Image (cartoon, rainbow, N blue to C red):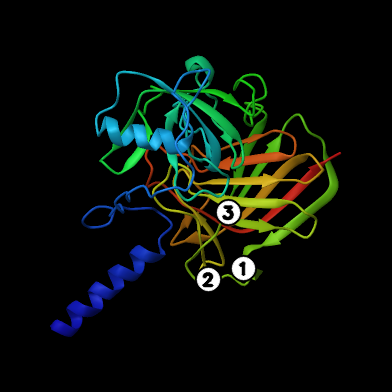
Amino acid sequence: MKKITRLMTLAVTVFALASCEDVPAPFGTVVPPKTEAGTTDIEPAGSGTAADPFNIAAAIEKCKEIGSTASTDKYYIKGIVVKGGTASGGYGNVSFDMGDTKDATTTFKAFQVAGTDGAKLPDGYTVNAGDEVVVYGPIYNYMGNTPETAGKSAAYIVSINGNKTGEGGGDTPQVGDVTKTVDGTTVTLTDTKATPSANSITVDFNAQGWENAQPVSDLTLEDGTKITFAQGEGTISPKFYAGTKGVRIYAKNTITITSSTKPIAQAVMKCDSYDGVDCVGNSTLTASNRGTTFTIINDHTAPSGGTQLRIQTLTITYAQ
């Protein structure tokens, strides 16, 4: 009897790992605790005003002084984006990490910040690593260990690289230009305003030499086009799995395709299927195109769950 029980337990475990439906773990998802912000060699500077914003070191210092309850006062904070983010889910805001340098390890989180003057950001709006950003709003030391802005659009972006969010700051997608069609395990995303050319490139994710269950981030193709996988607002980061011969994109993960020179017209993804389920992402999967930057979001109503997007090959077609 004990042997039969063990075999049944093993079978259930294997099914749970293989399924492309993201189901909750038996005792819930374990979320790693946020870690204590470190120290920095850069001295705190600024007074938190529009004319003299805090640098990141000063913002972190101020958050520690304020404590774990959001401040009633609002402050201006200026820094370089270390880890970018993309607006999704129709919430109109975006989260990203800022440092005093582009490779800083000590960071301040701009959490769920709105567009300039509180404007709602469109889904697909992206703040990129390396951007110089000024944010404004209440701040605090979340859980006593993570300096950040108050969430739910309580703070907003003043400028990105000197521009307002609606005037060239950040990457603003052409909303509604990309259509999605699903045929079995093939997902086709087409920019209706672009004319596809005969020029395309296909990448096989099973031929990249990645280890099983390896987290994936960046891949540069032979023509210079770059594919960036990101966790976005999800709880799990994208990973490669040898058994399904591709990359698994979980809830709210993003894929950004950046062409070095040529505008992108279409992206076609050949996906996996398992146990009768086509792993083509959630029905709320969206895409946007800004010429040479094509962004795909496996959007969902929650940061976990839903249907995985298991991509085996990706064909990128450039515009005429």
Identify the mark at residue 185; answer none if there is no mark. 3
Q: Earlier in the sequence, mark 1 or mark 3?
A: 3
* Quadrant housing the N terminus: bottom left
Of 115 and 296, nearer the camera is 115
Type of the residue with mark 3:
Thr
Discs 2, 1 touching: Cβ within 8 Å: yes
Residue matched to label 1 = 206
Q: Can residue 40 be seen?
A: yes
Q: Is residue 179 left or right of residue 39?
A: right
Residue at the location (41% across, 53% down)?
Answer: 236
Q: Position of residue 163 (x, y in %)?
A: 64, 22
Q: Mark 2 sits on what residue?
A: 242
Q: Residue furthest top?
A: 117
The CA span between labels 2 and 1 is 7 Å
Looking at numbered disc 1 in the image, what kind of residue is underneath it?
Answer: Asn
Q: Quadrant of residue 270?
A: bottom right
Task: Identify which amino acid the numbered label 2 is placed on.
Answer: Ala
Pair 2/3: label in front: 2
